[in-house]
Amino acid sequence: MGVFAIFDGHCGNQASRYAAEKIPLHLEVALSEGIEQRDSHFFTKTQALEEALSKAFANTDNSFCNLCTTDGRNWECGSTALVALVIDDDLVVANLGDCRGVICGSSIQSDDLCENSVHSELNGWMSLVEGDEQGWKINRDNANCFWKDVVDIHSPLREDEKLRIEKANGWVTVEQDVCIGQLKRLDLYDEDVMDILKRCFSDRLDDKSKNSVAPGRLLEVGRVCGELAVSRALGDRDFKSSFNPPSSLDFDCTDNNKHQDSLCWKGPDFLPYYTQQCHNSCFYGDLVSAEPEIQTLKVGRKGVFDEFLLLACDGLWDVMEVDDAVRVARGLLFEKHWTARKAAARLAELAIQLGSSDNITVILIRFFRV
């Protein structure tokens, strides 16, 4: 079994440090319970793994939020969480927040991306096209290279997340900024930087969906009630119903029938209620959720080789498109024959040279057939 995780804290490092220490322990307990449940309730192995991850996240969040106000503490921090669990040929990925993960592999089959294939675009897989300018052969031995996002990020601007927040009587604000600072930090002497910039300003100009990290772009940041830039996280107790006092009678929380079955709680004083017309400072359910989204995949399929999993926090993805990260990682692993650790360090270095000003964590896991 392998467990790989990234915790990216905000408003302090207590939540991320706590999660890094406690989630493996909660996961071990949950896995033991899951094995028993699987035997008694006929759970499949993947169902048991998914349930174990959900329990580990919930228990970690609950214990940390309670810790935040004990013994004189007044912690207001939180953390994103990305955990990948590998057991045999099962890969289970659980996520809260804006970290991202991508799995990549190659196959010599000619119909890898056809409609009926496991690796078809209908199943979320994308083909990595030729065009690398550093001499790295993307498709070697006549093989097709394909990749897939294994994480759905939790932004307040995501339509379903925004609706959930608004249903809880919250709101989402949008900030816009031009990334001039990124331009100033670019290292134009790095060949990989120049290669990525050429793709940003050439073949992607007509497709704005593939030009979301270009330096100088207009950046939109959504925030939960004008504060947090992620809609799901560990911690952030001020945004969760179980850790805030119920509303007093001074607040009229009975005027909305759709919330009659939800606990009404008084929001924290620091939220800018004045920006919302006649807001009663009440919320219903969690504004920031600790329920992870989980994806399960198979690794080591017959006919698939050069397979790896790339996990990183937003410090990488803010300045690098997924296909660029995959292209660089493949070149380092299979053309230059670097170790996964060394290749991950290079990706982090490249993010800095592309102008990232955020903290950067990169994990690269290479799968070998036995």
Image (cartoon, rainbow, N blue to C red):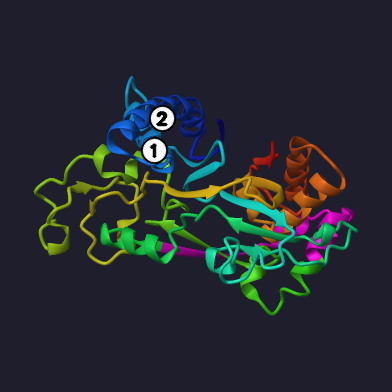
Q: For mark 2, give the secondary structure.
A: helix
* In this rendering, position of residue 22 left or right of residue 55: right
Give the residue at mark 1.
48
Query: Percent from the top left, x then y, of residue 104?
Result: 67, 53
| Residue at the image point whose x is 44% and y is 57% from the top | 223
Query: Percent from the top left, x then y, of residue 272?
Result: 35, 55
Question: Is 182 one of the magenta-colored residues?
Answer: yes
Q: For mark 1, give the secondary structure.
A: helix
CA separation in Å, label 1 and label 2 = 7 Å
Give the residue at mark 2.
31
Q: Quadrant of the N terminus?
A: top right
Q: Name the foreground residue: 369 vs 177.
A: 369
Q: Quadrant of the C terminus?
A: top right
Give the numbered dot on residue 14.
none
Quick check: marks 1 and 2 in contact, CB under 8 Å? yes
Local packing at callout 1 (Cα closer than 10 Å; few below 14, some 14-19, many 20+) is many
Q: Residue furthest bottom?
A: 206
**Which of the 4 image quadrants contains residue 132?**
bottom right
Residue 100 visible in the snapshot: yes
Q: Which residues are magenta?
A: 173-197
Which amino acid is tagged 2?
Leu
For marks 1 and 2, the one nearer the N-term is 2
Query: Percent from the top left, x then y, of residue 144?
Result: 74, 62
Which amino acid is tagged 1?
Ala
Residue 37 drawn above or below residue 173: above
Q: Residue furthest top?
A: 71
Question: Is 360 one of the magenta-colored residues?
Answer: no
* In this rendering, position of residue 48 left or right of residue 179: left
Residue 256 visible in the snapshot: no
Query: Percent from the top left, x then y, of residue 40?
Result: 28, 32
Q: Name the foreground residue: 25 vs 1.
A: 1
| Residue at the image point whose x is 48% and y is 46% from the top | 95
